[in-house]
Amino acid sequence: MELVLIFKLADEWFGLEVNDLQEIVESPELNYVPRSPDWILGAMNFHGNIVPVLDLAKYMGLADSAYGDRVVVLPIGQKALALGVSGIHRIVPLDPDLMLPCQQEEQKELHIRMLYNHDGTMVNMLDLPSLLSSLETL
Amino acid sequence: MRVEITYKFIMGFIIVVASIVILNLVVPMLGIAEVWQQLVSVGGAILVGLVLGSLFSKAFTSNIKIISAAAERISNGDLSQPIQLKDSKFPDETVDLAISLNKVNENLKELVGRVRDASVKVSDSAHGLSATSEEMTASSHELSNTVEQISRGAEVQAETVEKTSRLIKEMAVNTELVAASSIKVADAVDVTAQTAQGGGEKARHTTERMMQILQDVERSGEQVVNFGAQLGKIGKIVEVINGIAQKTNLLALNATIEAARAGEYGRGFAVVAEEIRKLADSTTASSEEITDLISHVQDEGQNVESSLRDNIKEMDEGRKAIDLTNKAFEEIIATAVNTQTKATSISELSQKQIEGANLMVNAIEEISQVVSDNAAATEEGSAATEEQSAAMSEMAHSAQELATYAETLAENVKRFRFENELPGA
């Protein structure tokens, strides 16, 4: 059964498959990264790896800054990255029947794959590959 | 040589007789006839008698005439000329008479002069007396008027004294009322002082009780503050618990992620992780509830504290008010004691005043007696003065009469004139 981490970005709920993430960290020590864009909060030490932390809400244009001292670390592989989010809700099992498609425009700008109806709350399912590729292009 | 008339007559008679005798002797010798001898001797004797008689009578009658003329002059008041008789070899009684008349004349002169002077003086004195007595009459009239005024004044004085006596009696009555009132005031003030002392006592009790309450309230306030501080400590502990719960939650999430990654082997672990997450969630929920409660209780405690502070302030003000009341009572007591002393002294003073007023009444009554006596005496004096005035008038009248008499006397004396004076001058 697929599990989904539901987290908060500004005033909206977002979801990410548990298989796509490494760990959830609370308030890491952030180091300044020289010549980084303003949506990079800094770099954290994750078990000896230097991982840049992305201000996701700012990057996606949802808010000026909505970092809430919670960082979602993606698996250390081809590219190390951590997402600074407003808050963590919980991990819930995913019911595929409740998945809804979303509009194309939203998908492009916000990197949203689909919408998930979690007990009446609309959760934007984050399109991680799209997000990562957009970062690659920069 | 002085010869009295008698002797002169005797001498004349003797000479006539002697001539008769001598003729009787001489004639027969002359040769005259005897028929004629008798006749010649008688005729010679008659001739001698006639010659002698005419000589004597001439001398005598001339003197008598002079004296009689002088007496006539004197009787007419002419005292200017003394009697001058012809010198005679043989002065007789006519000369004595002339000398006597001259003396009379002199004496009269002197007397009339004196009478004149006296009458002038009497007249002057009478005029003076009359004027003086008129003045005295006027004075006595004035005196009479004055005495009448005094009499009236004495009557007024008597009335005034009576009024004064009445007023002093009224004053004495009023003073008695004042004394009674001051005694009442003293009693009332005594009651007031006692009441004020009671009030002061109660105010002191109230202050003590309020102080106790205030201390209790302050203690309660401290307790509330302590309670708040302890609640704050609990809140901190709850925060710690909350942090632990959140970390536990995170650990559970990561455990879930790890279990998911482990696949089939991690399923049981995932269940445990879920249970742990639930526990952590419920812990968070509970700690949030506790935090809410704490903040609620802290708010309440702050309300209680502020209301306690308000209470303390109000009680402080109440205490001040009671202090003021207490002071006011003390002042009332002091004033009451003062007033009591004054009222007592007023009472004593008014008692003395009453005695003094009674003495005054007696004195005034004596004065009244004296004044009535005075009035009576003055009336008598007035009557006496009027009598005196009448007597003075009479005296003036008498003085005028005296003056008239003196003038009459002077008038009477005026017809006597001295040398070179015209009659009636």
Image (cartoon, coloured by chain):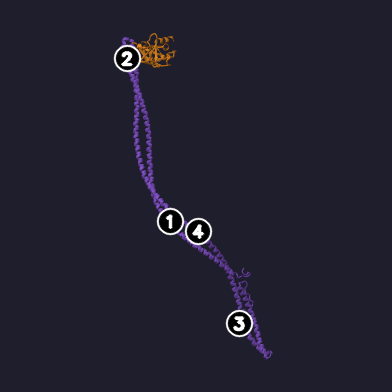
Name the residue nearer the viewer: B332 or B175.
B175
- Mark toward the start of the polypeptide (2 vs 4): 4
Question: Depth check: B77 or B158 in front?
Answer: B158
- Residue for badge 4: B145
Label number found at residue B73 = none
- The mark found on residue B368 in the picture is 1
**Residue at 34% of width from left, 27% of height from top?**
B224
Find residue B7 and name its label.
3
Tell me whether the residue at label 3 lies in contact with that at label 1, contact meaning CB atoms closer than 8 angstroms: no
SS assignment at label 1:
helix
Q: Secondary structure at mark 4?
A: helix
| C-alpha separation, residue under disc 2 versus residue under disc 3 | 227 Å
Amino acid marked by disc 2: Glu
Whether residue B266 is situated above or below residue B183 in the rendered picture? above
Q: Is residue B271 visible?
A: yes
Q: Are marks 2 and 4 in contact (CB under 8 Å)?
A: no
Marks 2 and 4 sit apart, C-alpha to C-alpha, by 147 Å
Residue B262 x, y percent position in the rendering: 33, 10
* Residue visible at 34% across and 38% down in the picture: B202
In the current view of this chain or complex, which residue is farthest to the left? Answer: B268
